[in-house]
Amino acid sequence: MGVRKIEHTFSEKKVSYYFDADFSYLEKIVSKEKTVLITDEIVFAAQQAKFEGWQTVVIKAGEQYKQQSTVDGIIQQLIEKEADRNTFIVGVGGGVVTDVTGYAASVYMRGLKFGFVPSTILAMVDASIGGKNGVDVGAYKNLVGLIKQPEFLLFDYSLLQTLPNAEWINGFAEIIKHACIKDADLFSLLEKNSIENFQSDAALLAVLIEKNVQIKTTVVVADEFEKGDRKLLNFGHTLGHAIENIYQLPHGHAVSVGMVAACTLSEKLNRFDPAAKERVKQLIEKYRLTSIISFDKESIWNTLKMDKKRVSNEMNFILLNKIGEAIIKPIPMQQLEELISQSL
Ligand SMILES: NC(=O)c1ccc[n+]([C@@H]2O[C@H](COP(=O)([O-])OP(=O)(O)OC[C@H]3O[C@@H](n4cnc5c(N)ncnc54)[C@H](O)[C@@H]3O)[C@@H](O)[C@H]2O)c1
Ligand SMILES: [Zn+2]
């Protein structure tokens, strides 16, 4: 099967998605001479052959390098490579690389064109889509950045062959999230399969990724600037972020704990079926994610109080009506405090 190009129209521009593409297809999209690739050292080492003949900037791997100093380093190398207004920048890597690349490309000479080749499950189904990019400032996640869409996304699923299992698992948390908020059929597909099935069946993996790319894209296109529906993508993330900060759990695991907790709140406040909650919990465990941890309610509450999603005396929570359907529910802070201490 050949490459399929699909265009999605965002407010600012059309973004081309190339599905079932081999990395080498990049040469058909951009000029090899006028392009600089940005990747991290782990992806560079794991996929060395792919980078042959391309000018490449290699950054250090890991969230701790998603900082302004890394962007400064990239800019320095772009100057050395004599990048100008006609240079194209392509981020090849996980969400850290795509976030940093989109930001660096957007500010260098007031903005060069850029595209992404996501190389983790999370980057393919989530981080590379939607135009949010930027860096952390110290411990403050994604504090600085901008919304700017890439020109294109190229999906080469074979990049995932070198992705460590722990990162596959992390990425599935976002896939389960998409199923919970938007797609009961996807939820069933996940129930019928396992990570191993997706790892060993390239066609099935392609279907899965494409379905998830479609879900995230549809949500973002409908609400690019997060006034409504895009908030649904925060399902599991409000409590998840608090847990991630305090307990240093990997993002996917923290979000999974957050999703199960959000199901409990949905049961209490939204008549979400307890049997459906059990299905969510089982699915999370099937994908080797964490469903429940014992956490210190007071420190979670103290962290939650400071969340930027808090609007005066209420906090917007994403709850489920049923599997595949979510709503935004403002919960008064006092009620939330009671629920956390009594129900979670
Ligand atoms: N912009 C957005 O809308 C958005 C959405 C979700 C997440 N994010 C951001 O994404 C980041 C997380 O992304 P991530 O989970 O991809 O993390 P990551 O970029 O740190 O990648 C995870 C690890 O896998 C390695 N890796 C990547 N691809 C590989 C491959 N093909 N083979 C071998 N190793 C590989 C990386 O070097 C890294 O060590 C966070 O910074 C988060 O804030 C952004
Ligand atoms: Zn997430």
Image (tube, grey):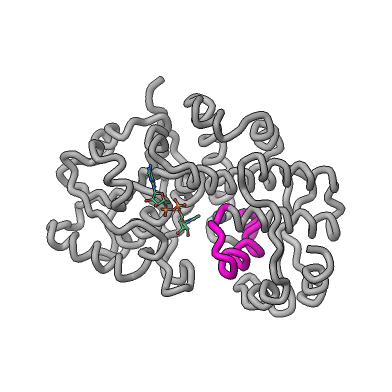
Query: Does residue 230 appear anywhere in the picture?
Result: no
Instruction: Look at 29% across and 48% down and name the residue there.
Output: 90
Q: Residue 64: image x %, image y %?
A: 39, 65
Start-end of magenta stretch: 228-252
Is 309 covered by the magenta stretch? no
Tell me if residue 74 comes above or below residue 307 in the rendering.
above
Q: Residue 86: image x %, image y %?
A: 19, 52
Which of the 4 quarters of the picture holds residue 22? top left
Instruction: Look at 12% across and 61% down and name the residue there.
Output: 80
Q: Residue 76: image x %, image y %?
A: 19, 65
Q: Residue 193: image x %, image y %?
A: 63, 30
Report the front residue among 7 and 209. Answer: 209
Instruction: Look at 66% across and 42% down and name the residue there.
Output: 179
**290 relative position to 341: left or right:** left
Tell me if residue 24 comes above or below residue 218 in the rendering.
above
**242 relative position to 78: left or right:** right
Instruction: Look at 42% across and 32% down and name the residue there.
Output: 19
**192 relative position to 123: left or right:** right
